[in-house]
Image (cartoon, rainbow, N blue to C red):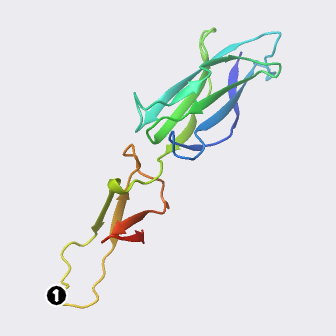
Amino acid sequence: PSQIVLVSVDRVSIGIKGSGDPETATMVFQVLSSDGVPLGPANPITVQFELVAKTNGGAGSGEFLQPASDVTDENGLVRTVLNSGTRSGATETIAKITSVTPNVVSRVVPVSIDGGLPIVRNLTVAPVDCNIEGLCYFNIRTQIVGLVYDQFQNPVPEGTVVSAPVDDEPATL
């Protein structure tokens, strides 16, 4: 085997477990000879898959690849599925063949894991300017910034609609 190329990835962004968004991304790689010919059943090759980077996730967040290895099919293809955990962040996956020296390694495949649904108890709202001269001037405006997180303290995706009670009345932010 000379190279491993990415054939497809069905999603470049998935949601955390329990978010209601798709929680998996399927990656398909192809193993090629030095002549660019797919290595199939005549020369089956075992390919391992590895998460090489998990930004903002890390140990205990639960993302994993299934299967962790695969054997090339008749077209030299192998597949794995990234399953999300409970933390948002960026992941990077590689495919590699360790049965040869030097090892053959694919390029990195990035997939982001987005946060889940907003939770009101994880909502922080504050003005940009804190000392507005409201008693001296009328109609002075400032921006209000909202920081919104899901049940696992992950930031929710930008553009998420949030409903929260304000003085016991519902308001949409």
Percent position of residue 56, x then y: 40, 39
Which residue occupies 70% across, 30% down? 28
Give amino acid for label 1. Answer: Leu
Q: Nearer the viewer, residue 166 or 11?
A: 166
Instruction: Identify residue for label 1.
Output: 135
Q: Nearer the viewer, residue 47 or 23?
A: 23
Q: Is residue 49 left or right of residue 85?
A: right
Residue 100, quarter of the rendered image? top right
Q: Is residue 121 visible?
A: yes
Q: Where 96 falls versus 170 (above or below)?
A: above
Q: Secondary structure at mark 1?
A: loop
Q: Is residue 108 visible?
A: no
**Which of the image's four quarters has the N terminus?**
top right
**Which of the image's four quarters has the C terminus?**
bottom left
Residue 172, quarter of the rendered image? bottom left
Which residue occupies 43% across, 54% down? 118
Q: Is residue 35 left or right of residue 141?
A: right
Q: Residues within 10 Å of mark 1 (few under 14, many from 20)?
A: few
Percent position of residue 108, x then y: 57, 32
